[in-house]
Structures are given as structure tokens and as C-alpha cells.
Amino acid sequence: QVQLVESGGGLVQPGGSLRLSCTTSGSMFSIISMGWYRQAPGKQRELVAGISSGGSTNYADSVKGRFTISRDNAKNTVYLQMNSLKPEDTAVYYCNADITSASVRYHNVWGQGTQVTVSS
């Protein structure tokens, strides 16, 4: 069964940086497109950044210029580099992807989430 595995969350001071990673549970799975989402307590889940199969990217206005999404197709991994972090970036971050394996396509696969806390 295909899964997405996230890593890289943690506690960081305001102005600091973190890099999140999201990879598939096996090398037989390939990421087609992916989005990073976040959900803060009491708030709805929101799209933070997305990357297409061709490498096109899009960002929420709140993170433009601070966050960068990228992908390493050889490693089946997508990254979210987060710089100049603010307390309002505190949330659980989730990756979500369309994945393919042996001509089978898996839609809307979610990772387990990783906590990012920005606090002094």
C-alpha cells in the first residue's frame, strides 16, 4: 500500500529555518504532483505550496518569498524549505500527492503530518 512519509518538523525560533521532506513508502512509487498543507489549531487546513509533474510551483500569499517547494525525482522526494519562520507558521504540516506505480494511479494520498512550532 502506498504511503507518504514526512520528516523535518520541530521547534524553531522566529526567523529560523526548517526543511520538511516527504517521500513515498517504496521506490516503486513515483510522485506525480504534490502539495504541502498545514492546519493550525482551530483553523481549516490550507494549501501552503504545490509542485506539478513539470516542476511548476505555486504558493499561498502568506509564504511567498519565504518558503520554497522542490522535488528530487530520483529520490521520489518533495521538500519544503521554510525560511524566516513566524509564530503564525506554527501548525501540523501535511503532504498530499498523486502517485503512480506500474501504470496504477493513486489520487489524494496524505502523509501523517509533522508538527512545526515557531516560538521563542
Image (cartoon, rainbow, N blue to C red):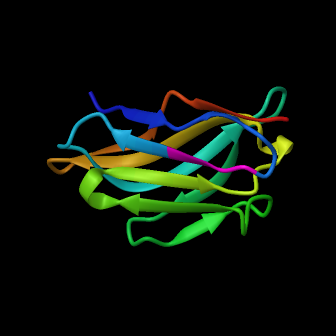
Relative to residue 81, is residue 51 drawn left or right?
A: left
Q: Position of residue 98 (x, y in %)?
A: 39, 49
Residue 9 location, x and y as percent? 59, 35
- Residue under the point 80% across and 59% down: 62
87 is higher (above) or lower (below) than 77: above
Q: Is residue 37 magenta?
A: no
Which of 108 and 54 lies nearest the eye of the viewer?
54
The quarter of the picture where residue 37 lies is top right
| Point 23% across, 37% down: residue | 26
Looking at the image, which is closer to me, 5 or 53? 5
Task: Quadrant for residue 54, please give it.
Answer: bottom left
Q: Residue at x 50, y 27 (%)?
A: 112
The residue closer to the viewer here, 24 or 108, is 24
Q: Is residue 93 left or right of 71 when viewed as pictured?
A: right
Q: Main secondary structure of the magenta part?
A: strand
> Quick check: 110 left or right of 30?
right
Which quarter of the image is occupied by the N terminus? top left
* Image position of 119 with respect to 49: above or below: above
Residue situated in front as seen by the camera: 53 or 16: 16
Magenta residues span 16-20
Image quarter (top left, top right, bottom left or bottom right) of the C terminus: top right
- The x, y position of residue 22, in whole percent, is 44, 43
Q: Residue at x 26, y 49 (%)?
A: 100
Q: Indicate whether 69 appears above or below 37.
A: below
